[in-house]
Amino acid sequence: MTSLDRRSVLRAAASAAGAGALVAGCAPDRAKDPGAARAARGPGPSGAGRHPPAPAARRPTRVPGQGAQIEHGPRDGRAVALTFHGAGDPRLATALLGEAERAGAKVTVLAVGDWLDEQPAMARRILDGGHELGNHTMHHRAICALPAAEAYAEIVRCAERLRTLTGTIGSWFRPSQTRRATDLVTSLARKAGYPHVLSYDVDSLDANDPGAPAVRRTVLDSVGPGSVVSLHLGHAGTVAALPPILDGLRRRGLRAVTTTELVT
């Protein structure tokens, strides 16, 4: 992205953030449910198979001594993990990753499988930036309300997309439309190859599009050493909020790292 393109994207992000613009996110009442027909469909013409593999992602992270669900890292360190639910406009996602990289920050993206079908190049972009990639289900349905077979398919189909694009099923699994997984979903994730479910202890509430200043305040008022922060790609307010969030972390002596680096 050229400097002119970047300025244009950020100007649009700031304008949309100030207006509380609605972009597709992870809020339960906004999640899409494409139904059985789409659930049965494989990658389309722009799907994973038409693109060369990205650099190999990390395999699923295993943290000895940690429980089945991880909400935060060590409280005695100086690191935090900014984790992003992966969906939405790839221009906003690319702008956000660029802002993180300019600040020397690394993030974790939990990608929705049908977003990867539509935007397969984003897997390469995330990994090439030194970031971490994981699984946020195939269609972003309310996974804890699904029958076991359907919930498992949501996990496994996204894992297959990640494997095709990156060589592994990704570092983490995060359930869709919930902060914490049920015991059933946790066991299904383990069966699919993920030792832990990734939760979080700070919710930025950015999926509600409150505007960049509100996102910044919500994060910085709650974050501390070891925090795992939930944010979203595809929201203009989040792009505009990221630089001041990173500056606020720096002023407190905190740095943004991948979730694997935080907890291992």
Image (cartoon, grey):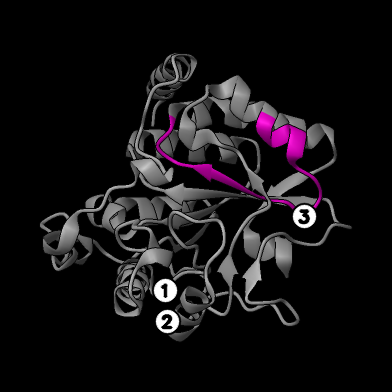
The residue most toward the right is: 76
Q: Where is mark 2, residue-wise?
A: 192
Judging by the rendered image, the residue that carries numbered circle 3 is 226
Give the residue displayed 68% in from the left and 36% down from the top. Answer: 219
Q: How many angstroms separate mark 3 from mark 1 (CA)? A: 25 Å
Label 2 with label 1: CB-CB less than 8 Å: yes
Nearer the observer, 158 or 127 = 158
Where is mark 1, residue-wise? 169
Badge 1 marks a residue whose secondary structure is loop
Residue 182 % position (x, y): 52, 71
152 on left or right of 66? left
At horizontal 47% and vertical 28% (from top left) the residue drawn is: 209
Q: Which badge, 3 or 2, is on the more N-terminal residue?
A: 2
Residue at 29%, 73% (x, y): give it: 150
> From the viewer's perspective, is the residue at label 2 or at label 1 nearer?
2
Label 2 secondary element: helix
Alpha-carbon span between mark 3 and mark 2: 27 Å
Q: Position of residue 119 (x, y in %)?
A: 27, 50
Magenta stretch in the rendered image:
218-235
* Amino acid found under the numbered disc labelled 2: Ala
Does residue 27 appear left or right of residue 160 in this picture?
A: right
Name the side, left or right, on which 167 lies relative to 128: left
